Image: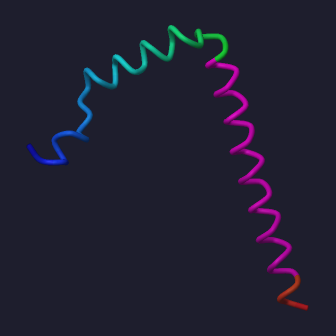
Amino acid sequence: MSLISLVAIGPWQILIIVVVILFLFGGKRISEFMGGFGKGIKEFKKELKDDEETGSDSESK
C-alpha cells in the first residue's frame, strides 16, 4: 500500500466531511463565517490595489 493511496480523498469522503461540518456548526454559522471570509478577501485585494497605485506614483516622482 503506497502513501498516495492513503492520502487520496474521494468524493464520498468529502461528502462525509461536509455533512459533519454542517452538523457541528450549522448552516447559519457557516454562512456568517463565509461572509466574513469574503469581506476579508475583498479588503485584501483593495489594499493590494491601493499599494500598487501608491508604488507606481512614488516611482514616477
Residue extending farthest left? 1
Q: Which residues are magenta?
A: 30-57
Location of the C terminus by quadrant is bottom right
Location of the N terminus by quadrant is top left
> What colour scheme does the image use?
rainbow
Report whether 26 appears left or right of 19: right
Residue 48 vertical position relative to residue 38 in the rendered view, above or below: below
Residue extending farthest right? 61
User: At x 19% / y 47%, what residue is drawn?
Assistant: 4
- Judge whether residue 41 is colored magenta: yes
Where is residue 13, by image quadrant?
top left
Instruction: Please tell me whether the stretch drawn in magenta is mainly helix, strand or loop.
Output: helix
Q: Position of residue 7 (x, y in %)?
A: 25, 41
User: At x 73% / y 31%, what residue is drawn?
Assistant: 36
Report whether 15 appears left or right of 1: right
User: At x 73% / y 42%, what residue is drawn?
Assistant: 40
Nearer to us in this view, 23 or 37: 23
Where is residue 15, by image quadrant?
top left
Q: Position of residue 56 (x, y in %)?
A: 80, 80
Where is residue 20, by image quadrant?
top left
Nearer to us in this view, 46 or 29: 29
Q: Position of residue 53 (x, y in %)?
A: 81, 71
Residue 47 vertical position relative to residue 17 in the rendered view, above or below: below
Report whether 53 appears left or right of 15: right
Residue extending farthest front? 1
Residue 31 vertical position relative to residue 41 in the rendered view, above or below: above
Q: Position of residue 29 (x, y in %)?
A: 66, 15
